[in-house]
Amino acid sequence: MKRLLLYASLLLPAMSIAATTPDWLSTAWSAYWVDVPGSSPQEFGVYHFRRTFELPSKPDHLVVHVSGDNRYQLYVNGTRVSWGPARSDLTHWRYETVDIAADLHPGKNVLAAVVWNDGPGRAIAQVTNQTAFLLQADRSEYATINTGSLWKCIEDKAYSPQPLPPDQNTGYYALSPTEKLNASAYPWGWEQVNYDDSAWPAAHELSHAAGRDARDAPNRWMLVEREIPLEERTREHDGVLRQASGITLPNNLPHPGSPVTVPPHAHASLLIDQQYLTTAFPEFTVSDGAGAKVELHYAETLYIHKQAKGVSNDKGNRNEIEGKHFYGSFDTYLPDGGAHRTYRPLYWRTYRYLQLDVDTANQPLVLEDLHGTFTAYPFQKKALFATASSEQDSEIQKILSTGWRTARLCAHETYMDCPYYEQLQYAGDARIQMMISLYMTGDARLMKNGIALLNSSRTAEGATYSRAPSHLQQYIPPFSLWWIGMVHDYWMYVDDPAFVKQMLPGVRAVLEFYASYQKENGSLNPMPWWNFVDWAKPWKNGVPPANPDGSSSAALDLQLLLAYQWASDLEHALGNEALANTDRTAASTLKSTVLAHDWDSARGLFADQPAHQTYSQQVNTLAVLARVVEGREARSIVEHLFQDSTLAQSTIYFRAYTNATLREVGLGDRYLDSLGPWREMLKDGLTTWAEWNGPDSRSDCHAWGASPNFEILRTIAGIDSSAPGFRRVRVAPNLGALQHITASMPHPEGEIHVELQQQGNHRIADIDLPPNTTGELDWAGQTHPLQSGHNHAEF
């Protein structure tokens, strides 16, 4: 925590020496958690809190720490300055730290917050204790603004929850209800300094707040500071009007200076195409319209309607709207007849298509503006890849830009599988998302946050939840193994050994959990819970075939083998050498068992189980990545993977691993040829990658499909880490038919830049490495050392 000297006071006695900033993690706070007197701690509710205060002059700094449950937004003199808290669990409840001085002024000021609880229907990713708000000034001389009984509060009766109607549900849905807002009951201007809150009651003090390491954590919130930045908020480009009924729009969508009026006793409907999927705060401004109803509907795409009582999963081309139907969630706004009323839902929405439905009563409604404000984790893309061939480059850039949008929409306060349906940070999804972040941005903060959240979900058995945070427990044991993989990834690409060392007890716990289910030969007995590996069509619920009793699944055995290999690396470098040897021995035993029981020499493939009844791309992918066989045998397996259609096929998720085998066995030149499913999705008009390719995919945005965003750099340009912390770089290109590429990616010490050319057997490489970094170029059978700075090789 920075030590800040603050020169202004809140009309308190002057202090000659600034007080020392407390250790907020290990102390009890003077601020109280507060709620509204008489309010329900668990039911749906929206609440406003205000604290007015005087300043003799504008301070240089005034830092506050702020949190809420479920969520809050903080305003200073009408300007929104903070929102959150970043989703986590009760033993790591986040608070945001913000300097509010820029929005303060001499004289009267107001801090105002809206806090809401989505109630029993809250999103599965939303953990909660009870409705509450908290604000603590960083310096004791500003203690008068800390939350307590000096704050005013009120319950906002204008809001009510709006669960998704069953006839609008198009798949498993794990989000909070949307909202209905009755503008007649809304306290307009509540966040402004001159609002009259004299009739509001004093806030009810629950208990003092406390940091996570304090002796006690009253009311269960164990506070830790948010370690990721606030989300980006940027105005979206205007969408395109695709259909309109009951209204004429002379200049496309309503916008400032060009309002549109819906007459009395009329129904109007607008279908708006954002032209790409987004996560945004939709916002509209209206005047008049007392007694009207406005609904704003959200959809990833439109659906082909096949029968009267259902929705077809066949969405067709996402750009086409004719003959299709709109299904999805919606917010409802009931105007009060006031002028220039702006409505924005409390939480962001996911959509490509918006449908605005207006039903007026006796008064016309004037639509003055309609737009969205994009929001997501503020990643900054730094990686570049380009080819000299304009036709090939155009396709590659389309794949990269689509993947980048997908990755961004699935990264907010955590990674999430999909923004429209679930917003849950599954370990299987997140491991791929983390690699995208590292290669495209070099920003590892959300990765570190995700690893820690999954680690803290661990239960006594040793396994992590399949997803975290989550108020509903779910276990996918193989995802705990992918968690070990992401710890290993972090160790290799990020220079932060102290954090990796903190995760080692969790790595050991996962392996102990698995060890309790291992046979003497290392193979697994039947595992509890949901042992999802991939959505392969021949498999039931994504679970790979095993022996009749559920034991000896090659897919699970091989994932465990990979985990032992990763763990032995981590223990050797940062932990316990005896445990490293134990992990190596376990890996060796399991490798021998898989070879003895699952290898089919006649087919040259690994079977899904010892009985050799079924075969899959997934199992053979894992066998290659775990180096159960190497050299010619491994290369032969990979050639089979891409030729044998009788194998259970990897979906878009597991293709992240199947396609990676090409690089592992020296077939990386074929990587671009492996992207057929992505090309199919582009032809279908998708602007993000779907949960799986094909007409029956549920979600149109799943970040696990964006693996080309790192594999194009890792496989084609060949850039990879070859030492912990990315201290050494290996460049092993696979240009295939490409003759000239340039690529760059972020590195902990700066940037890696490569320019590679090939013409026949002649190759030229220009490679720039950042300071304190060495490596090697491995291309076409030749190896050249690389030093920091510029390197040139021609052969």
Image (cartoon, rainbow, N blue to C red):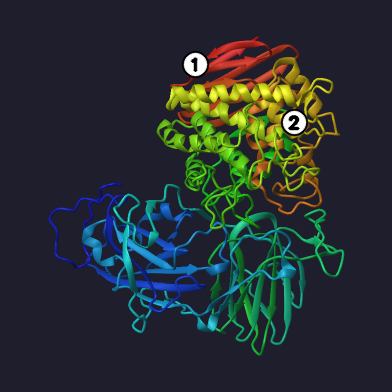
| Quarter of the picture holding the C terminus | top right
The tag on residue 672 is 2
Vertically, is 696 above or below 199?
above
Work out which residue is located at the far bottom of the displayed protein and give it: 362
The label on residue 703 is none
Identify which amino acid the numbered label 1 is placed on: Gln
Residue drawn at (30%, 52%) of the image? 214
**Based on the displayed image, in which of its 4 quarters is residue 189 positioned?**
bottom left
Residue 282 locus on image (x, y percent):
60, 65
In-image side of 357 versus 92 (left or right): right
Give the secondary structure at mark 2.
Answer: helix
Residue 356 spot, x, y in % from top left: 69, 71
Tell me where residue 615 appears, x and y as whole percent: 80, 32
Q: Is residue 770 visible?
A: no
- Give the answer, above or below, for where 693 lies relative to 332: above
- Looking at the rendering, which quadrant does residue 80 occupy? bottom left
Q: Amino acid at mark 2?
A: Leu
In which quarter of the view is residue 620 placed?
A: top right
User: For the residue labelled by badge 1, is the local secondary structure a helix, a strand or a loop?
Assistant: loop
Is 531 in front, or is 435?
531
Q: Earlier in the sequence, mark 2 or mark 1?
A: 2
Give the distance between the C-alpha atoms of the residues marked 2 and 1, in whole angstroms: 30 Å
Identify whether 487 is placed above or below 572.
Answer: below
Crowd class of label 1 (few under 14; some 14 to 19; many from 20; radius 10 Å):
some
> Could you say which is closer to the camera, residue 512 or residue 391?
512
In this figure, which residue is indicated by the disc labeled 1?
787
**Nearest the eye: 501 or 396:** 501
Which residue: 42% across, 73% down?
A: 48
Rendered view: 365 above or below 191: below
